[in-house]
Amino acid sequence: EVAGFSAYTAATFDEMKVLMNAKHYRGYLMDLNLGHPGADEISPAREVYALVRKQVEQGEAVFLGVSGRNETVGAALRENIPAESKPFHVFPFLQRCKELR
């Protein structure tokens, strides 16, 4: 539990898809290149964001992709995928989740 939220973790993109199919969440926080450490690959974040974009746009969920590589963050931002560089502060993300309807 983090700041009053239960957190579910996934080490791979397939695990994340299983969790996402099980229920809707208020927040989706992920490594932009989940399953491809050190690469500029953002296809995992692209696919996850495509699945939750409607929820995000309707104010029902928050999405944030993070990476330790500025190039990866830049690639995500060019595709309008919400992203920040590591290290980042998780509490603003959690606050946005709390403020959802």
Image: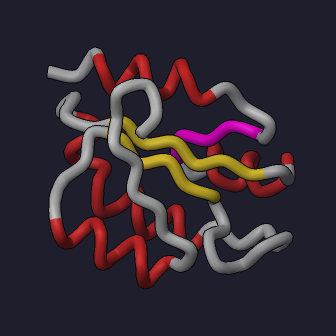
Q: Quadrant of residue 94?
A: top left
83 left or right of 15 in image: right
22 left or right of 70 in image: left
In percent of width and height, residue 60 lies at 19, 34
Asked whether 82 falls inside the magenta stretch, the response is yes
Above or below, 50 against 56 in this view is below
Render colour scheme: secondary structure
58 left or right of 9 in image: left
Residue plotted at (43% across, 69% down)? 47
Above or below, 14 against 96 in this view is below
In percent of width and height, residue 19 lies at 30, 69
Closer-to-camera residue (11/17):
11
In percent of width and height, residue 7 lies at 40, 48
By secondary structure, the bulk of the magenta-drawn segment is best described as: strand
Closer-to-camera residue (2/75):
2
Residue plotted at (27% across, 39% down)? 26
Above or below, 31 against 22 in this view is above
Looking at the rendering, in which quadrant would you find the N terminus? top left
Residue plotted at (77% across, 56% down)? 72
Determine the residue located farthest toward the front in the rendered image: 1
Residue plotted at (39% across, 21% down)? 96
Above or below, 76 against 98 in this view is below
In percent of width and height, residue 27 lies at 36, 41
Q: Which residues are magenta?
A: 81-85
- Count of all numbered marks drawn on residues in the image: 0
Looking at the rendering, in which quadrant would you find the C terminus? top left
Asked whether 34 falls inside the magenta stretch, the response is no
